[in-house]
Amino acid sequence: MMRATSLPRAAVPLFGFARLLRRHGFAIAPEQVSGFMQAVTLLGPRSMADIREAALATLAPPPDRRDEFEAHFQSHFYGNASAVVEADADQETRIKDDGGADDERIEAEQQQEGGELSSVLEQLSMRDFQRDDDRLAAFRRRLSAALPARRSFRTVRTHSRGKLDLRRSLREIVSADGDVPSPLLRRRQTVPRKLLLLIDVSGSMKLHTADYLKLAHAALQGADRAEIFTFGTRLTRITTALRIRDRDLALARAAAQVDDWDGGTRMGPTLLAFLSVPRFSSFARGAAIVILSDALERGDHAELETAMRRLSARAFRLSLATPLAGDPRFRPETAALRAILPVLDDLVDGSSLAGLTDFILSLARPAPAAATLWKRVS
């Protein structure tokens, strides 16, 4: 997001209002903030009502939080602090975006070689990663070639099996004084699909989180396009941190960014928060999405089911890797798993790095749908 110090004086209160909403858990992308300011400019504005309407249209508060939005508007622009209605902490999903603000510093660093039960209670803590042997080197080397591919709209020159490149052919004819040269052809380029990893860092996943972060770091180093998010009671994008080549430094940076290690889990709300930010949602379009979680959703699973259906509609392939599947007796029998199983392409064992790397490297190969496969097992 832009910085207030670089804005015109008149725009600072508008930026401050958007920042206030983000601080209270509203899902607002940087482009929405820019749209808000542009809308106010177009409207004049002639009154505070114009600013309010521009905020409603561009910042798009959810209907169930409209009263809270109004209270923050009154507080910020009118100084009416008594109007503020605090959201229930257990229902608030906070989003933390690394935003790529430190890309230049991280790019320099890249050159260096160098829970037993799920809970809805939020617990903030830090995590320290210990160094161990890098078992992911082979995975990193093979990943780019192993990912599913798609046909890009960009074209490349080819000597056979392509379509006529009319523009280049006409240039060749003109340069050859009307002689007809050999036909010049182009074909659509084939590029790897995006890889999106969503990592559960709640207390029930504590034994596996360190390995998952190491896997994510290797994936970012090996894939042309990959995105990494963590979720528990909050949603955090850690892609920029994990782009650092040195794994220890990258994991330490990621550990500092994530606030909700080993706490509770609100899988449905955090995935819906991911989808509510246009920039994040675009990461899922046409991607191979792998969710690393036990999917132990407490209470009503309606939000989780909604989020998974929307993710499935956007994704090329949607997979859930759960460490619970490492037990031969495991069956998807919880209400949440039964609800989301029909929209999953894969429900696989996420209890070991070896199994996970083999699975991700096989994403380009077709496999039976998760519901079909687990119906046979059951």
Image (spheres, helix red, strand yellow):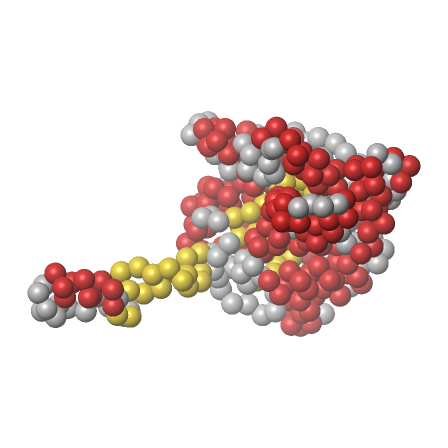
In this orientation, which residue lies closer to the viewer: 38 or 139?
38
Residue at 60 percent of width and 36 percent of height: 2
Which residue appears at 25% of the width and 68% of the height? 166
How far across and how far down the image is residue 64, in percent? 83, 55
Q: Is residue 173 left or right of residue 33?
A: left
Location of residue 250 (image quadrant): top right
Q: Residue at x 63, y 49 (%)?
A: 42
- What's the residue at 14%, 66% (across, down)? 173
Q: Quadrant of the C terminus?
A: bottom right
Instruction: Examine the image and state in which quarter residue 179 appears.
Output: bottom left
Give the answer, above or below, for where 244 lies relative to 88: above
Q: Nearer the viewer, residue 353 or 190?
A: 190
Q: Tell whether 351 sits left or right of 114.
A: right
Q: In the figure, 323 relative to 211: above or below?
A: below
**Residue nearest the viewer, comparing 280 with 292:** 280
Q: Position of residue 123 (x, y in %)?
A: 80, 36
Residue 71 vs 314, above or below: the answer is above
- On the image, the x and y values in percent for residue 171 come to 18, 62
Figure quadrant of the N terminus: top right
